[in-house]
Image: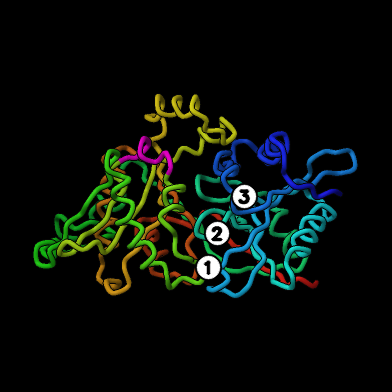
Amino acid sequence: MRVDPVQSRADLRAFVDFPLRLHPTDRYVPLVSSVIAAHRDAAELFVVRDRRGEVVGRTSMHRSAPLDDKIGPRQLFGHTEFVDDDDVFTAIMDAVATRADGRHLFGPVALLPNQTGGVITSGFADRGFVDSAWNPPYYPKMYERHGFHRRFEGDTWLVDLDGTAPAARPAAGAPAGTDHGFTFDDARMAAERLVIRHGSRWHLRSQLPILRRMLNASFAQLGYYTDISAEQLAEQTDGLAFLLDEALLLWLEKAGRPVAFVVTVPDISDYLMSVGGRLGVLNQLRLLATRGRYRRDAVLIIKGTVPDEQGNGYLTLLSRELHRNLARNGYRTLRSTFVERTNVASAAQYRRAGGRPLHGYTFYERGTAV
């Protein structure tokens, strides 16, 4: 096995194309190729070739000072894909360990756990979706056979909306106006000076700082989370404005102060699978012209409440509004990126809506010696 750095355009093309050949095209959702190319600014990319020169694996290697401060010094790896072969996996991890200088290995992350990465450990028959992983069953087996242990285990979630969101259906015997699963006393709206705001295609850039402040504050207590910079958020939301369903990006103001938020987007996974993650100008125009086709499924990317307002039911209020809007706009399903199993309150929001865990999810860690 040879572990070769990505240096040329042909190398990058081989890196991008490898998982498209490896995985089923109706389950694996590729990361946008331009995002992978941008990651070369912060990480080294590698492809693994067998003796015939065929690509049989890939990975990236980098470090993050903010994540080191959070969980201790780690050698990070990401974009990690491989055929079902112990020698290939060993070649990848030996190369990562060589760069580690005694640090534990942690991944796969691209570039951080709060961006993309992870390995699914169950639910392999269900397709992946944007901002989430999909891999075959041999991936977790391979990691664990080679001495890795699970870290930050969680689940992705699926809520079947079937045309009428649970939030819009009254519970049996409930008073008129009560939303099943998302009960909130509307008298509090005026008493607490609460106002629900919506995202805007035309003003999203100016709204991002509001979301970033709430995001960093509400997630700081999570073990894997590092503050997201303005540049990182701009990169992650690049191109979102022209796809945005304004009814699905919500935040709550309390006396003029933003205190809670929910970021949900139309699920364009089918389109990304059809174009292999290549969203050049022409494919962006095609997506824009056909975006109405991708208003059947939605993905909840992230939600949260600033620490001093947690426990006041504000996410319940936003969830009620979100599910009303999903039903009103004809969405069939809501998927969510992974929620740690220790985050019981967040998972409870999906259970209230009649949701179920979709994919088991984890990151992996290993000492450099096995």
Identify the mark at residue 112; answer none if there is no mark.
2
Q: Secondary structure at mark 1?
A: helix
Q: Secondary structure at mark 3?
A: loop
**Number of the front mark, 2 or 3:** 2
Reading the image, the residue beneath label 3 is: 124
Instruction: Give the vertical position of 161 relative to 101 (above or below).
Output: above
Q: How many marks?
A: 3
CA gap between label 2 and label 3 equals 23 Å
Label 3: few (<14), some or many (≥20) within 10 Å?
some
Confirm whether the magenta stretch covers residue 240. Answer: yes
Asked if residue 127 can be seen in this view, the reply is no
Range drawn in magenta: 238-245
Q: Position of residue 176 (x, y in %)?
A: 14, 55
Confirm whether the magenta stretch covers residue 264. Answer: no
Q: Nearer the viewer, residue 56 or 179?
A: 56
Picture quadrant of residue 62? bottom right
Identify the mark at residue 66; answer none if there is no mark.
1
**Number of the front mark, 3 or 1:** 1
Label 2: few (<14), some or many (≥20) within 10 Å?
many
